[in-house]
Amino acid sequence: MKKATAIKGLAAALGLSMLMAGCGSNDAPQEGNQPAAGNTETAQGSVGSQVDHKIIGIDPGAGLMKATDKAIKEYGLDDWELVEGSSAAMTAALTEAYKNKQPIIVTGWTPHWMFSKFEMKYLEDPKGIFGQDEQIHTIVRQGLKEEDPSAYALLDKFEWKSADMEKVMLEIADGKAPEQAAADWVKSNEAVVSKWVDGIQPVEGKKLTLAYVAWDSEIASTHVVKAALEQKLNYQVELSQVEAGPMWVGVSSGDVDGMVAAWLPTTHEDYSKKLGSTVEDLGPNLSGTKLGLAVPTYMNINSIEELKK
Ligand code: PBE
């Protein structure tokens, strides 16, 4: 058995006793309003005690973290903690918990491969804290249009569907290098990519810098745009991986040429309020996103409100 942290050990112990409760009789006291049969989770106590009152978050600069902080306040989840980390740490924790059918609550978003690799559900958000569907926008530095019309034109035309992004994300999650997954996608989606590049004058190895945050969705999109710029227009694209704040500031100051990772109008509202007038918004490159708290479907919980118990 591998060494586990105290918290992991606790979760494992709870998981084990849950299994045992499930195997035994069902006469343990039941809480909540779900039917008793097979209801191992309520037999085990609240979801809060099962997950040690922790929500597994991502990088602190993400809008999703701010929304989750707000949800904790608005739903009165006083004894809950939002654990900061990274997208990679969150998906690693989720992968491990899922493998062992252990309870876990993560900050989730769509498009994301977690919903195709695992059976997951969003917790209902009756107060609407996580907002409505929004779009991912492409943002470039001021002056790019005049100084680099070809890159500007492609970035302006770049747009794709959630299913496209998910396909690239899934390949990366399954182990393909982001550069390779993106290059392959660009090669096999000629019809879409030609709409981004047709009529644009190629360059001769001109350099361009794009900023992004290591969110799985943005790793996919940013690498695809880099692949299109390089394969189709002969750019040399450098990617600068930073936190959310520096990504916005980088475009605003002109240190980087642009980014395709601005979730608007809500998730990056703070950044856009502060810096929106100092950048150029080229509009949505993808619509129909979603944010929220996500759990594996084997968990017996449906709404954020139930976390209060
Ligand atoms: N995300 C993914 C980001 C935007 C892209 C939802 C984690 C966030 O700022 O929350």
Image (cartoon, helix red, strand yellow):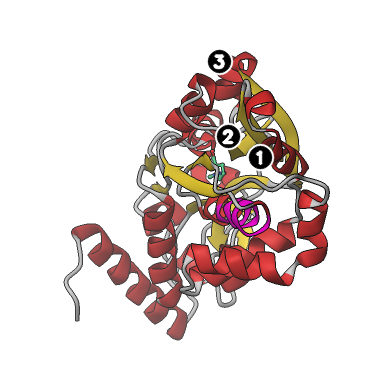
Residue 110: percent from left, percent from top? 64, 53
Mark linked to residue 151:
1
Q: Quadrant of residue 114?
A: bottom right
Residues tagged 1 and 2 counted as in contact (Cβ below 8 A)? yes
* Label 2 CB-ligand 1 distance < 8 A: no
Is 267 contained in the magenta span?
Answer: no
Who comes first in sequence, dot 1 or dot 2? Answer: 1
Q: Residue at x 61, y 56 (%)?
A: 224
Position of 7 relative to 35 (above/below): above
Residue 152: percent from left, percent from top? 69, 35
Question: Which three-letter amino acid code belongs to the residue tagged 3?
Answer: Lys
**Distance from the alpha carbon under mark 3 to that under mark 1:** 25 Å
Q: Which residue is mark 3?
A: 274
Nearer to us: label 3 or label 2: 2
Answer few, some or many: residues within 10 Å of disc 3's Cα (few below 14, many 20 plus, some between 14 and 19): few
Q: Which residue is mark 2?
A: 258
**Distance from the alpha carbon under mark 3 to that under mark 2:** 17 Å
Q: Main secondary structure of the magenta part?
A: helix
Position of 40 relative to 155 (above/below): below
* Label 1 CB-ligand 1 distance < 8 A: no
Nearer to us: label 3 or label 1: 1
Per the image, label 2 sits on a secondary structure element best described as strand
Q: Which residues are magenta?
A: 223-232
Residue 123: percent from left, percent from top? 62, 51
Q: Residue at x 75, y 33 (%)?
A: 283
